[in-house]
Amino acid sequence: MPPPPRPQTPEGGKTLVYSTVDGHDIKLDYYLPRGTTSGKLPAIIYYHGGGMTAGSRRGGHFPTWLYDHCQKRNYILIAADYRLCHPSTALDQIADAKALLTFLTSPTFQSALSSSSSSSSSSNPKTEPLSLDPTRIAVTGFSAGAYSARAACVYGTPKPAVLMTAYGTGGNLLLDHWTQPRPPTSIAKLVNLDDVPRLLADKRVVSDDADAGSNRFALTVRWEMDGTFLDGCFGWPGLGAALNKVEYAERAAAVPAELRAGFLQEFVGEGYPPAVFVHGTADEVVPDLESRFQHEQLGRLGVRTRLLLVEGAGHGLVDPESGWPPRLAEGAMEAYEEACTFIDAALKGGL
């Protein structure tokens, strides 16, 4: 979603480069729990939304409630950027999700954590340095950020301990919603579609779309209206139309071999982590079928899963009738709280 006026992100975050691709640095911010200077801590990864094409780890939809939960539970919060579609692709986002998990368990990151707390803990040489527990990493994704979160669960090492998505993309990219043209959504009016040719001509790699005026989200709106969302995300002209020509049951087999890895639902297996899905039943941007599909898929595999539907909520769990800026729908924060309880149980080994 394109961000509204930006709130202040929490203080105390530290920035690191977790991957460099062809000279382009991809960054994360990490937030340590206040007052904690030692011990092996769990972590929650946060992936922002933005239609696969826009957004930033510090963007206007930063979940301050998730930050507060991490502070309360003594977790490290990690907010990560990823390469945005055009000129990058969904396959690049998968590579970034894998790179992030590799980096978080590397000596480089562990050293950064130790250095962050050394000034407070150095007085006691017997104190265990602060570090991340690689067996207790939760991954969360909001809207398009759920694609990266889901990719981490399929391809990442170490495997996350638990997944949480909110109104998230990537549960099933073979739905008609992604292969057919459709009318503009309620947030389409926030972009200038006349800017699309300029955006397509710009081949610079972008992973931190911090400028709310960049208008990159116009790419997503144009692709959705034209039925070319998959074309744009995978850099494969004609993909959506080709898949739309075949019956739904035959679409997975019709995906080009070069792109198959990007259709994550085809690689969900018994080793998938426990997962909780939060979605509004009136979401016109990412249908709740995405969450319903994966919830049912995991249930058939015997994986612990929970589906939290917020009745009448639109994209972002907002009340569609509340005007602009929209307010959260009734029951939204309760759903987030239940999702956090699920995460806590998984990180404690209680699922």
Image: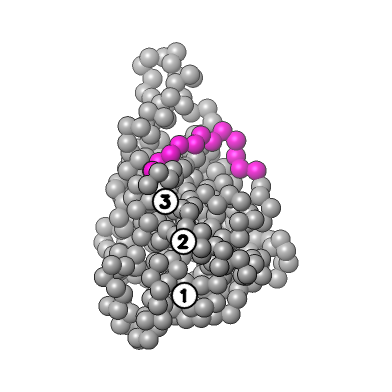
- Is residue 60 rendered magenta in the image? no
Residue 138 horizontal/vertical position (percent):
41, 48
Picture colour scheme: one colour
Q: What separation in Å lies between label 2 and label 1 (alpha carbons)?
A: 13 Å
Residue at the image position 42 percent from the left and 58 percent from the top: 88
Residue at the image position 40 percent from the left and 35 percent from the top: 41
Viewer-closest of 245 and 130? 245
| Residue type (three-letter) at the residue carrying disc 3 | Val
**Residue sticking out furthest to the right:** 323
Check disc 2 and report its element: helix, strand or loop.
loop
Magenta-highlighted residues: 8-21
Rendered image: mark on residue 139: 3
The nearer-to-camera label among 1 and 3 is 1
> Is 49 placed above or below 111 here?
below
Check disc 3 and report its element: helix, strand or loop.
strand
Q: Quadrant of residue 176?
A: bottom left
Whether residue 62 can be seen here: no
Residue at the image position 46 percent from the left and 75 percent from the top: 228
Q: Is residue 227 left or right of residue 315?
A: left
Q: What separation in Å lies between label 2 and label 3 (alpha carbons)?
A: 24 Å
| Residue type (three-letter) at the residue carrying disc 2 | His
Where is mark 2, residue-wise? 86
Rendered image: mark on residue 228: 1
Check disc 1 and report its element: helix, strand or loop.
loop
